Amino acid sequence: MNLSNQYLEELEYDTFHHLGFTSSNAKESFHDVKFVCVSGSNGRVNTFAHYINDQLKLMKSEDVKNICTTDRFVLYKVGPVLAASHGMGTPSTSILLHELFKLLHYSGASDVTFFRLGTSGGLGFEEGSIVISSQALNGMFKPNFNQVVLGETIEHATGFNEEFISQLVAMAIDLPYDVKTGATMCCDDFYEGQGRLDGAFCSYTKADKKAYLQKAYEAGVRNIEMESTVFSAMCLRAGVKAAVICVVLVDRLIQDQILISKDKYSDIQKRPWEIVLKYIKSRLPLAVNGS
Amino acid sequence: MNLSNQYLEELEYDTFHHLGFTSSNAKESFHDVKFVCVSGSNGRVNTFAHYINDQLKLMKSEDVKNICTTDRFVLYKVGPVLAASHGMGTPSTSILLHELFKLLHYSGASDVTFFRLGTSGGLGFEEGSIVISSQALNGMFKPNFNQVVLGETIEHATGFNEEFISQLVAMAIDLPYDVKTGATMCCDDFYEGQGRLDGAFCSYTKADKKAYLQKAYEAGVRNIEMESTVFSAMCLRAGVKAAVICVVLVDRLIQDQILISKDKYSDIQKRPWEIVLKYIKSRLPLAVNGS
């Protein structure tokens, strides 16, 4: 991973404020990373790290430990897999990605693939379905991530490698649940930003909401979450391959509230992991031996 | 707290997806809340809840427990004080506030004051100084929070009650560190969004950065964080009194990296708490007996 920020060279060492450690041992500890998997929730990342280790038998279970020393995020390293939480929303996710990109830059890691494994509302897809994003759109259905930098709005393109997405879909063909591609809409709020009627405020009618979600569906949107645009845009800028794989918790064309049981939630949130596991396994000899 | 969303009346009960419980016992458990204190970090909120309880001796220490059943946020109730984490950035904070406002709406709580107690970069203020926000500005120095709703950008005003802010400043006069008012700039990223040179990317020069921070200073900005605009705008919409009190971790006119020791960080992050404690104590007979 090569970053173009010339000012990084002026630092004797770099303090990753939100990961809680510095760049000083990046090369020894992170040069072999090949896969980075990020999700919103700390607990889910912990369970994912143990799942990957159980499946690939890379280290002793008791050595699977959070190496982030702040409580802003969690970070696990399981062989060539780095798993981290990004919290909710694009600002929090951008902080994690800045620090992970810098960490991998200093480490000399090469040919790294990034996955966001998340939860989402579906559009016409029922709970438990999986959406692999073909596009990441903002709330105006544009494939952009807008960022205010030094007082000006900068528009960054989003997008995914079609061949890579097709490869992931093909790998999922024998899984016992729906795995489809579709555009993912990224919103900056869970309630009004996603047209829900059950927020603290609601300045529109049920009919307005229906019309908006219908327009989103017609624009190709099949699920809605809060991180895909910044994840896609930053991975494009860093020149790394990336995919967003989300499970649907509720079909937003039917209802707003998420009413599935904790057991079902805990079960279906693991579905994106099975696809990533297949991909990692397909590349593992490469990952373990270096590329 | 009275919310104007008519659709909430259609729900038999409301599921707070990110707090992990429903509205069913809101009245019994939360009707006496008078103060809501929010911060980014889970750990800081835990320490704050214990601090408030130690100071006010409201309940047994072992009863100070996180009542949020997801790992998205933490939530503590210590007598009339509710303490919650909001993660980093405006989207995450908006989710917490939607759910807290609804909870307090169903509970029938009245005359509730909201505080955000955070960390920030300073402009011309050294580490350890406290800024009580007189304004919450976006990255273009405007007192607005912009939100995309049903595909349109809605501009919400931000602002604070001057008399209340003056009251807090007066209460802080005998504290052994600088407590000042100033405009707070809210950015959607920690690195490029705040003009730092030490992010993974940097598309501007050191001179551009200096010019931007100087312009911010001239616009009255004295500290920079990532939540004040949405916090202020949503509290204004809900009609609740609100203040943002942040400690400065680094003077951004001097450097970007935050290099203070963990002990010093852990010490100075408590400074905003002392001001809130004074305010709560000044209102406590009212809070305990109901208003």
Image (cartoon, coloured by chain):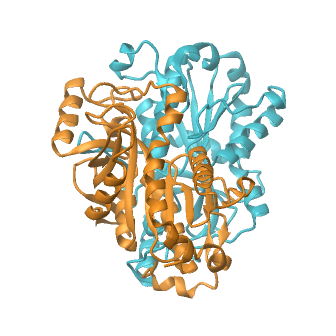
Chain colours: A cyan, B orange
Q: Quadrant of residue B57?
A: bottom right
Q: Position of residue A233 (x, y in %)?
A: 42, 41
Q: Does A208 sit left or right of A262 as displayed?
A: left
Of the pair B287 and A222, the residue shown nearer to us: B287
Q: Position of residue A276 (x, y in %)?
A: 68, 41
- The total number of labels drawn is 0
Report the front residue among B182 and B221: B182
Residue B125 is drawn in which quadrant? top left
Residue A50 can be seen in this image: yes
Name the residue rendered at 64%, 85% in the picture: B12
Q: Is residue A77 above or below residue B97?
A: above
Taking the spot 75% from the left edge, 63% from the top edge, the residue there is A262
* Coordinates of residue B106 in the picture (x, y in percent): 56, 80
**Above-or-below relation of B271 to A192:** above
In the foreground, B101 or B190 = B101
- Residue A187 seen by the camera: no
Q: Nearer the viewer, residue B132 or B252?
A: B132
Q: Is residue B175 left or right of residue A89?
A: left
Q: Which residue is pictured at 33% across the width and 18% down the height?
A: A6
Q: Is residue B217 above or below residue A267?
A: above
Q: Position of residue A2 (x, y in %)?
A: 44, 21
**Residue at position x 48%, y 61% in the image:** B280
